[in-house]
Amino acid sequence: MTLDRPLRYGMVGGGPGAFIGDVHRRAIALDPNTDLVAAAFSRKHESTLQTGRELLMDESRLYPDFQTMAAKESERSDGIDFVVIVTPNVSHFPIAKAFLEHGIHVVCDKPLTTELSDAEALGELVEKTGLLFGVTYTYTGYPTVKKARELVQSGALGPIRFVNAEYPQEWLATRAEQDPDNRQASWRTDPAQSGKVNCVGDIGTHIENLVSYVTGLEISKLSARLDSFVGGRTLDDNATIMVEYNGGAKGIYWSSQIAVGSDNALRMRVYGEKGSIEFSQEDPNYLKVFSLDGPQQILSRGRDALGERGDSIVRIPAGHPEGYFEAFANIYKTFTGALRKRITGDSPDEHDLDFPTVHDGIQGIRFVARVLESSEAQGTWIDF
Amino acid sequence: MTLDRPLRYGMVGGGPGAFIGDVHRRAIALDPNTDLVAAAFSRKHESTLQTGRELLMDESRLYPDFQTMAAKESERSDGIDFVVIVTPNVSHFPIAKAFLEHGIHVVCDKPLTTELSDAEALGELVEKTGLLFGVTYTYTGYPTVKKARELVQSGALGPIRFVNAEYPQEWLATRAEQDPDNRQASWRTDPAQSGKVNCVGDIGTHIENLVSYVTGLEISKLSARLDSFVGGRTLDDNATIMVEYNGGAKGIYWSSQIAVGSDNALRMRVYGEKGSIEFSQEDPNYLKVFSLDGPQQILSRGRDALGERGDSIVRIPAGHPEGYFEAFANIYKTFTGALRKRITGDSPDEHDLDFPTVHDGIQGIRFVARVLESSEAQGTWIDF
Amino acid sequence: MTLDRPLRYGMVGGGPGAFIGDVHRRAIALDPNTDLVAAAFSRKHESTLQTGRELLMDESRLYPDFQTMAAKESERSDGIDFVVIVTPNVSHFPIAKAFLEHGIHVVCDKPLTTELSDAEALGELVEKTGLLFGVTYTYTGYPTVKKARELVQSGALGPIRFVNAEYPQEWLATRAEQDPDNRQASWRTDPAQSGKVNCVGDIGTHIENLVSYVTGLEISKLSARLDSFVGGRTLDDNATIMVEYNGGAKGIYWSSQIAVGSDNALRMRVYGEKGSIEFSQEDPNYLKVFSLDGPQQILSRGRDALGERGDSIVRIPAGHPEGYFEAFANIYKTFTGALRKRITGDSPDEHDLDFPTVHDGIQGIRFVARVLESSEAQGTWIDF
Amino acid sequence: MTLDRPLRYGMVGGGPGAFIGDVHRRAIALDPNTDLVAAAFSRKHESTLQTGRELLMDESRLYPDFQTMAAKESERSDGIDFVVIVTPNVSHFPIAKAFLEHGIHVVCDKPLTTELSDAEALGELVEKTGLLFGVTYTYTGYPTVKKARELVQSGALGPIRFVNAEYPQEWLATRAEQDPDNRQASWRTDPAQSGKVNCVGDIGTHIENLVSYVTGLEISKLSARLDSFVGGRTLDDNATIMVEYNGGAKGIYWSSQIAVGSDNALRMRVYGEKGSIEFSQEDPNYLKVFSLDGPQQILSRGRDALGERGDSIVRIPAGHPEGYFEAFANIYKTFTGALRKRITGDSPDEHDLDFPTVHDGIQGIRFVARVLESSEAQGTWIDF
């Protein structure tokens, strides 16, 4: 059964000058029939009103705070179906908790929380309420990543032996947090807003999630080194992590915000006994596939079959580049598709539920906790 | 003054199974506040209703034909502000004419018409009515293309000497028009729907427009060869064109639909006395810039300054790939921005009007006419 | 039977400051057992002596001129087996003629001559004497080029439809010939030393030879435009050529010396009905192979099979880059291999004779003549 | 003063079927005036004679063993000036020792020895004898590597913060040592011929040497994990190493022989406060250079200035690819240049001595020893 009305969503965070809230709104809009109808964009109500007016929203649904929003929306017959949480990390937990407790489905930006216990509490709440909970690990939304996962699952690469994944960026190579206009640098390097980590929480978790999604490997233990290369900075801006997985495979992860010359260069290489793959987020329409003694192949989104799941989320033909917005939109397309099925009484199947969940969010926070623990113990190997 | 309501648009064409209509709708939705409210998606009313229902549109504004739509919408106080025309080439002219005559602004897919005289007639109508008229030459919407244009205009490359531009595709390397499911192959290779040309009209015109936009060079004469390599096909599937520009620069264009291995590989190289640039549509976040005796530079969208105009249309930071939808959206963002200014009584400036206009559309049709003329005369040089 | 002594060769040209003579000597030395023993490196005997001393050669075989050298060496029992001619274009003919007439095998740099009649005369002399005659069209020496040829011959690409080949360079984008230290620029742009053409003779002929070698296609007619973009220069520095081949395939060639940013960017794309290949001389260890609807493949020299002939000339494993010297050396390895068989009484087979011959040299000069003829007739199509 | 005779060298190892001996001979021959005159190519004299005959050598200088060769050659007035040692790792020490003791200069393949104490003993012998001793760490011979070093030394990158270097290969991803024809796989994975390590000794040492050469950084401590992924193999085939350098910089090295799809993919990225560089051995004619907020630059060998030292070893113009042989030849060109100065009584300066020495060889063996020590202690950080 098809839902004969638009899905309705609200947003917490994403006010004036916020980068990621705008990205979420545009990504959702790329597919039809999901409308933004309520918001608490900012802790300053005037800012919420300003953004709401720019978006031509009904002012009666622009709320002074998330608590009011959760309460009021849950009472309306035309209340929001789900909320999108795009605030700084430290407030993810109370906001997500509030909406879940009001029976509203949630999409939350990553990292899920700053404390592992909070993340696990959200997991329990999701289980208890049965609500859908998505976490926007964007990069698993690329069709080429779906294909990478399928290649591993199908056995085409053979048993996986080694993973080398990295995520270098340049943007914190100088003390950008001292620039008053650089609000993101300020809050990300500020323990009060980001928690105990910066780099490994912001981008290291993307590595962990991407590798886990593609390979299905579970980390058994890790040894980590967190660095802070820029003087006067208390949180990490570089992380090197050696991992071991259940079953004997091993890997190495590197995330950095001081890598001059790198924009957003998430890259993953997975080596199996018979083949390997390479995915580069900055060139996401292509997937390199290698086999023993065979020629390098470059799969092209839209041209080459990317598997049932990958092909299902391609919007335009090969050679017409898709990018970051589409990856983001694919997370939402899947989440909202599952939600529509829920609302109309259908049962979402495995493909319908192929979006990052609260479980993935918890794993990310566990990863951060273990990395921190190892780094503080001079790289001692820590059980995951 | 800011417009305090959404812009309203209608669409002609873009019914079930149509590729490009869907692209237009998504691209428009990437920026907020422009709503689809009326349509004649198909010549079959039932198909229009079907697509309209999928998009949750008001059925009273799903019209049986474009004439009715133009008439009715022009009478409503909340009628559409502009129409988007995404039908096969042969019907562009009557549809555009009808809406212009009803005082409705127009965005039309390229090529503008199939006859040069029709294109010129539209040009006159636009001049007479003063309405805005956009033509969706998508590829000038990339920020890196704006930068390329700026580099030429600033004199950084020195006077331009030579241009090499190409647009190879594979998709008609076999007789795909015999596949009943391949509707696009059918109409594009069918003179009744496409006019006298196929390849040079569909993608050759993109080369002409892109080069003209970036370099500002005007073709003075050309020598062309149209080929039809696939047996049983009457229209061209490959075109090689030598051009000369006013001022002494020269160039070569190649478009092909039989280039096995190429998806949508539009590529332009412009050589000046002091420098050169290379743009590849399949890798649109980067622009290669060369200078005499100097090292190759790769400009990255979002990282490196792309000029006032280029920077103004970037939506996300470097390393977060933008693609085809964003290029398309940039055409619409500019067009709708200018239209909003018109509606609120402001005067659009040069940047506001930086979208492909009916003039560009006419030049494209003139280009096609001259190419056909030269090819039929065994490559004789034809004045433009 | 194996030859139990080194082959002996002499060189005409290649004196102090000459680039290409030094390249020939090093390329020959890359394989053992071929020794330089005689020379007339320069028209100035003192220069010949200087270079000879640097190479620790026996001064009694450093000759004042090529005529003396040909005469004396042909009389010695330990005289040279072959001569290498690396002088400016205009003197190739008399020198080659002299050595052939003295019964000495010849390797001559390209272009073979400056006049088609001279080239044909050499062809007749070769036929009459039965001597081996190699022309150093370097780029057919790459193993990946051998593979490209094999892919065409095997039918893997299907019948060839279209060829796009180009050879852009920057080095004459300014008036380099006015720099007294740039001797190569001086003689190449000087009709007295280069003949009637510059760019199309120097690098356009490489395109013609490479395409011909790989595809086996014979040009039936062509239309050409020679440009001279740099003020004060009389010979061409840019050439655009449309070609048709026997059998219906078509192509386009572009060579340029004013392409700012290009070093030596010879590149060839060959499109068949079922597949295509792309070869880039600046990245010669790889060959891109495309097939209808299939993924791009990148063959790697040393890793992937390059055919019987290609594999036979690979010296080091994959990932250990081979380059220009090796391509050059492969021409010589093949030529000297055939010559050794001649000397020991064995019959060279087809593989042994897989080096560019006087026939290839003649075709190159014919190509230049036809291009010049067409260009002087405003691009009229000229039968080949 | 110029040496008026060829340099004479001998070779130990490099008999029939050996890969690397052949590479040394060809690399030496790329520059004139250094001749192979003596050898003990194999422990089987018949094999030595066979290879010697193929190279048309004087049989009286084809020796049954290295001891005889060292003794006899040291007695001849026309004895060899230096010896090249290209045997399996375990015999490097006694051979090098013998020639040094006979007063003959040495070039030895890497790794220098299998025991650190042996390496140090060679270092002392070199110091005592004052003889020249080169170690063929090939990859520092690329002109682009010289430029990378110069960029660090000049301060252009600012103080170095982080290094990420890797060397993945595929060739031991299966149990290739069981193939009787794969002699290299056999001896490299055999502790009796390779010593206590395989992968980290063979290619991990290249990483250590390359990074040390380019950055000048000295490792202060390291934490390592050696893996053996292929069943039945006793020595390592994969190594992950975290390093810290004096001064606070940090790094990560990865070498692997089970990386399916990689041929010989040595790659180094060096990140400073102001800039970074990236070198890829498989694309050695280019060097990527990045600066804070600036565009990526790609330096091209032969086009862009590579520094005094880099430019001095370029043999051909830009766009004419140089490769592995040239890198190898540059080591020899430098070594033999210094040796010629010694023989003629001139003093070699710093540039003349810019080849890998016994000191670099010792550092490599120390690196291997420390890696092994850490790995056996579960990754404990070990002082260097």
Image: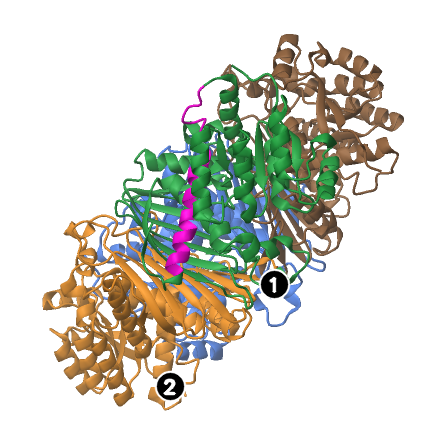
Chain colours: A blue, B orange, C green, D brown
* Extreme residue in the bottom direction: B345
Residue D219 drawn in magenta? no
At label 2, the amino acid type is Lys
Res C215 visible: yes
Chief SS of the magenta region: helix
Residue D358, image x and y in percent?
A: 78, 30
Q: Mark on residue B341?
A: 2
Q: Residue at x 75, y 30 (%)?
A: D134
- Please check whether the numbered discs 1 and 2 fall on a single chain: no
At 30% from the left and 63% from the top, the residue drawn is: B224
Q: Residues within 10 Å of mark 1 (few under 14, many from 20)?
A: some
Residue B109 location (% of width, % of height): 27, 70
Residue A248: where, in percent of width, then height?
Answer: 51, 29
Q: In this view, does A189 lie above or below A312?
A: below
Secondary structure at badge 2 equals helix
Q: Foreground: C196 or A64?
A: C196
| Residue C352 belongs to the span the image colors magenta | yes
Q: What residue type is labelled 1?
A: Asp
The residue wearing badge 1 is: D293
Q: What stretch is highlighted in magenta?
A: C347-375
Residue D3 located left or right of residue D277: right
Q: How far is the residue under mark 1 from the one under mark 2?
A: 35 Å
Could you tell me if the residues under marks 1 and 2 are in contact, i.e. CB atoms within 8 Å?
no
Q: What element carries label 1?
A: loop
- Chain containing the residue with disc 2: B
Question: Mark 1 — on which chain does it sit?
Answer: D
A65 over D336 or under it: above or below: below
Q: Image quadrant of residue D97?
A: top right
In this rendered view, identify the residue nearer to me: C370 or B21: C370
The residue at 37%/72% (across/down) is B219
Is B250 placed above or below C355 here? below
Say which quarter of the image contains residue B43.
Answer: bottom left
